[in-house]
Image: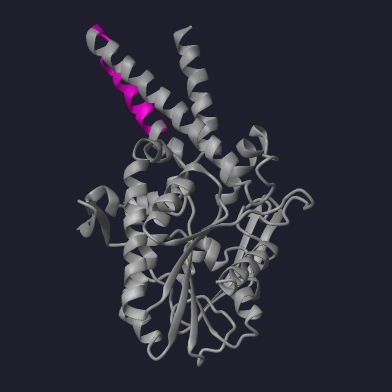
Amino acid sequence: MIYFSYLLLFLFILLMTIFLYPISIFFTGTLILIFILIKILNKYIFLKKILFSLFMLVFILFIFSATLYIKTSLYLNNELVRGNNNKQSFKEIFFNDFYKYLGKNNMVLLLNKKYDYAPNTEVQALRKDHDSIIYNVKYTIDKHKNRFCKCNKNAEDTYVFAGCSLIFGVGVEDNETLPYYFSKILNFRSNVINIGFPGGGIHTTLEKIESEDFQNLLKGKKFKYLFYNLTEDHPFRAYIGRFQDNVFRVKKDKLYLKEKNLILKSKFFDTMQFDRNFIILFKNLYKNKFETLTICLLKQLNKDISEKYNSKLIVFSYEDNDIIKKIFKILRQNNIECLQIRFDHSSKEDGYYGIIGDGHPTANANKEIAEILFSYINEK
């Protein structure tokens, strides 16, 4: 009977491995190791009881983190795609979410060893769900290692868009990104720069802004606004220093750089999907530290562009949750402008604002956000 129970348990873990990779790689390996030790030390009753308790503890953590993963996926994958009141079912998430991450990530082709884009690069990004194409678009990187945005590079007035894949424009063409639509509203007469970085956040933005390459790019320019798109994933990304050699930390409300430890240096932490899996467990336990770091980074970003370029920072988000609300409240107390964007899903079909099967903003969403941002600064 006990062997039958073990068999059922491992079959369940195998299913979780298939559908929740890579969360289950860590837990499956641990459980198998403990099981082997239990069999080896079978005659030592006391050790066997300890190992069995450890086995159950790891299994409970496995279930807990998997539940958090599914809960987070239900939220993250649907806010743009279907609106807050029309969530995907558990079955849709459980059986479809895994397939989004199969295959080679085409974004790797754009990156060099310094966690930056290779200049003057084009790549065809194809994402499929089984035999269905989610998107098939071209990403163009210009000579300054930013995503191409049609504009007047010689113009004095300059607008910079920063953030992660939402700003970069994953899943849409070069002429469907948020910076592109903003530039179009300006009749392509101003200089509009897209420094969005897929998988990045405020930490990669601050590093980019302080780089010599960016400073040279803005020489002789009137840097008017920096629009930063904040999401609830950014605090965690900043804390682990994803795509960075060092990590930012806060001590007595002051930022400092610290060398990564061996765990954070591992490629496991630099994968695009790591934080969507078992690390969600730690995101919930340590989110206050993550949020504090993000606030300090945004304050530093605001200080940098204000002192160096006499520019203004506008932080915006179309995620409506407690993390964003908390950060916005503190930022406003520090005189940093924040804009909460809300979409009206009532009269829109599924996929109007978010790419179905992916969740990134569509061309429709980017166009609407560009119009909202333009109206916001125009009214000031």
- Asked if one can make out residue 98 in the rendered structure from this viewpoint, the answer is yes
Magenta range is 28-45
Occupied quadrant, residue 305? bottom left
Closer to us: 236 or 135 = 236
Queried whether the magenta region covers residue 33, the answer comes back as yes
Residue occupying image coordinates x 35% and y 66%: 301
Occupied quadrant, residue 377? bottom right
Residue occupying image coordinates x 43% and y 76%: 118
Q: Where is residue 96 in the image (x, y as percent from the top left)?
A: 64, 42
Closer to us: 171 or 159 = 159
Residue occupying image coordinates x 43% and y 69%: 111
- Vertical relation: 58 (above or below) 264: above
Q: Main secondary structure of the magenta part?
A: helix
Which quadrant would the C terminus be assigned to in this image? bottom right
Queried whether the magenta region covers residue 81, the answer comes back as no
Q: How many labels does the image show?
A: 0
Occupied quadrant, residue 47? top left
- Vertical relation: 128 (above or below) 14: below
Side of 316 where 360 appears, left or right: right
- Asked if one can make out residue 113 in the rendered structure from this viewpoint, the answer is no
- Vertical relation: 207 (above or below) 276: below
Q: Where is residue 258 in the image (x, y as percent from the top left)?
A: 20, 57
